[in-house]
Image: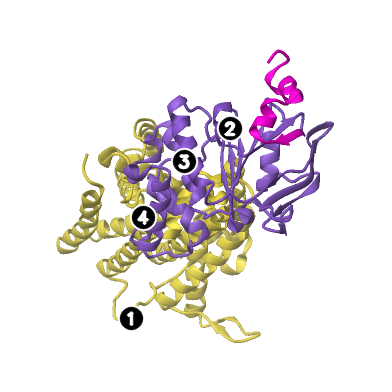
Chain colours: A purple, B yellow
Amino acid sequence: MSDAILSTDALTKKFGAITACNDVSINLIPGEVHAIIGPNGAGKSTLIAQICGSLKPTSGTVEFLGQDVTGLSARERSRNGLGRTFQISALVLEDTVLQNAMLGVLGTTGNPWKFFRPILKDKQLRQSAEDCLSQVGLSEYLQKRTAELSHGQRRQLEIGMALTLSPKAFIMDEPMAGLGYEGSMQLTEILRELKKQAPILLVEHDMDAVFSLADRVSVLVNGKVITTGTVDEIRNDRAVREAYLGQDA
Amino acid sequence: MIRERYVNLCLLLLLVAVPLWAHFSDEPFTITLMTRVVIYALAAVGLNIALGLGGLVSLGHAIFFGLGGYAMGILAFHAQTYTPISEWPFLLNGTKSMPIIWLVAIVVSAAAGLIVGALSLRTTGVYFIMITLAFAQMFFYFSISWSNYGGEDGLSIYLRNDFPGLNTLDPIQFYSICFALLVVALLFTSLLMHSAFGLALNAARQSVERVETVGLDATRLKLVAFVLSGMLTGLAGALFADLNRFVSPSMFSWQLSGEIMVFVIIGGVGRLFGPVVGAIVFVLLEHWLGGISDYWHVYFGMLLLCIVLFSRGGLIGMICGRKEVNV
């Protein structure tokens, strides 16, 4: 799997006696959506946190673009092109949608050490920010204060923020969380477009979304990947049904 | 709601008109009062960068105010006694020149800001407040025990320092110097707010997680804000010492840190002219209430309580409403 953009090798995280992540080796190859599913407490968030660098693994490595990034901070991994979205939106609420996106562009391509020039007059920066926002369907809301956005729009902005980094891979932690049927349909379409730009590692509870989007699915139970396969394989896997969907499913 | 820029313009006009009126109707005391307003405002404009833009609740800004004061005191003391500050490794003489004194005050404050900031920014919240306070107390007690420069009694400077082409002992001329520096500081803050740095700092105040996720270093942004903030407050300290022609450890006191913070809070945290409003209100009330009762702080405290309870965003917030988002 040398063509993988992102891969983990025997990733393990222990909190005292609890092993939250047990010998996880997964990868993300170009053009795919790789979904991670699993019941609550399976260790999905722990896995994501280790991949993104906010949590140090007890053992194992994370490789990104052919480079071992296990020792890098979350900030450095972002700079390398790992676009993360949060389960609970982490947005700058007092600022406008456009300002949020410009912050993203500033982080990767710009220079934050400019003290005098008004940033909103920076045409290039503004243009890239607006491009990203139009991709997630927020073009009409550029001047709106982020605090005034609906929950669904915040989810869209959350993804737009990851886009501003021109990422080589997306890591999305439950992007559909709290969305209604329509919202999640809309976001599914957005993600379908995004995967053409960069592969997506998707942690998601919304099974309709997962089954319609994912090229591959890994099932995580008690910190361990019990199986990886295509949507059809997973649907028909006995062990998965028992562990995840319940005994009688 | 009145647009903030009109209110700001009115405040600037007020700061020009009142001293001019006082000058022509021969009321030098009013000019001195206004000079205090302007210098306090400058100190608070400094704090506003850390507190308002960076969200850093620093209870140690007296460090910079005091360092600015002692920079002036020490340089002028050696100049008036014709003694060198040091003879080794090279001869260093005192000076009576304001621009040089300002420069020294700013550089020393920046250095202190870098050290205090780098250590304090390892903490957040209440711990940040306490550690900045602790640093200020260190400076306070050091200045008390430094007997070369007056120790507890402070240091008197007989003549106000010189500024090329001006007679600094003339109240209106000294006021003009202070006012000009305040305007420059406000202009600088205004540019800062709308700059790339301002955007990033503002984001770092609200969500460290977000800033780090886009690949920026939140701590470094805040540290730079803290240093810039200290530089302005340091400059104000040098002017304050020149106004009184006296420096004492009280410039390092925690009460002073508190007062500077009160200016910012009364006027409106993070608002460009918040510190100016705060300083005006504080100095005027100190003057009027102080005339009524020795215990004027009680009434002042009640007023402060009302402002904090009933107006989010201080007096500027009360008049102009919520801060406009920049478009």
Residue closest to the eye, B108 or A229: A229
Element assignment for label 3: helix
Q: Position of residue B165 (x, y in %)?
A: 29, 81
Q: Amino acid at mark 1?
A: Pro
Element assignment for label 4: helix
How many labels, in total?
Answer: 4
- The residue identified by callout 1 is B164
> Residue drawn 40% across and 53% down?
A131
Residue A120 sits above or below residue B52 on the image: below
Residue closest to the eye, B16 or A96: A96
Q: CA distance from mark 4 to mark 2?
A: 57 Å
- The residue identified by callout 2 is A210
Which mark is in front, 4 or 1? Answer: 4
**Crowding near the residue tagged with mark 1, few <14, some 14–19, many ≥20 C-alpha atoms within 10 Å:** few
For residue A190, the mark is 3
**Same chain assignment for discs 2 and 1:** no
Report whether B96 appears left or right of A202: left
Q: Amino acid at mark 3?
A: Ile
